[in-house]
Image (cartoon, helix red, strand yellow):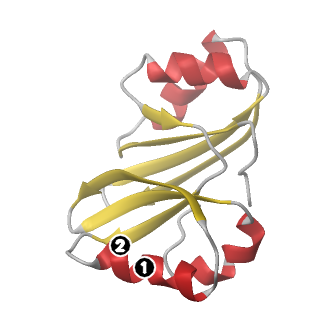
Amino acid sequence: MEVNNMNTITIVCDDHPGIIAEVSEIAASTGANIESFEAKTVGTLAVVSIVVDRHDETLLALAQSPFHAFSQDAILIQLDDKPGALANFSKRFKSAQINIRSLRIIRRGGGKGIVSIGVDKKEDVLDLLNDVRIL
């Protein structure tokens, strides 16, 4: 299921029981309807993407909570957390002549890093990232 669009909010946090309930309660507190909900475990982390009809209010409520939430048309990837991993990975884009619009290291730990990447033509890079893509 591909959930990334302009109303998508992504949350990266330590995996623990109750995440779905906590995120749902925060969205409900803003009066938002959740249109899509996707959650994955990546090592010791949880990556949750929700699509809501009250995006700005929900993002603000999540920002005021303990969750690390962000919103952008992004692709989340997982890389090894070691020197040169990001440099080697970014060569894929150079070879394919694709500009990276934004890149943000979301979380590091346990020998892995989660990185958010924004590109102009997301559909053109999905195959390029199949081996590292989370969402």
Query: Mark 2 belongs to which amino acid?
Result: Leu
The crowd level at tag 2 (other Cα within 10 Å; few <14, some 14-19, many 20+) is some
Question: How many numbered dots are placed on residues in this image?
Answer: 2
Q: Which residue is labeled 1 in the image?
A: 89
Answer left or right for 33 relative to 14. Answer: right
Question: Closer to the camera, 109 or 34?
Answer: 109
Q: Quadrant of the C terminus?
A: bottom right
Q: Secondary structure at mark 2?
A: helix
Q: Where is residue 9 shown, x and y percent of the image?
A: 61, 37
Position of 40 with respect to 45 (left or right) is: right
Q: Quadrant of residue 6?
A: top right
Q: Nearer the viewer, residue 71 or 134?
A: 71
Tag on residue 86?
2
In the image, residue 5 sits, relative to residue 92, either above or below, namely above
Residue found 71% across the figure and 60% down from its top: 120
Quarter of the image for the N terminus: give it. Answer: bottom right
Where is residue 111? Give x, y as percent: 21, 68
3D distance between C-alphas at marks 1 and 2? 5 Å
- Residue at 61% x, 53% y: name it: 74
Q: Residue at x 42, y 79 (%)?
A: 89
Q: Is residue 123 above or below residue 40?
A: below
The amino acid type found where label 1 is placed reads Phe
User: Is 111 positioned to the left or the right of 101 in the image?
Assistant: left
Q: Is residue 15 left or right of residue 49?
A: left
Instruction: Name which quarter of the figure residue 68 lies in.
Output: top left
The one nearer the camera, 87 or 56, is 87
Contact between labelled residues 2 and 1, with CB atoms less than 8 Å apart: yes
Callout 1 crowding tier (Cα within 10 Å): few <14, some 14–19, many ≥20: few
Figure check: 107 above or below 17: below
Q: Secondary structure at mark 1?
A: helix
- Write the residue at 74% across / 36% down: 7
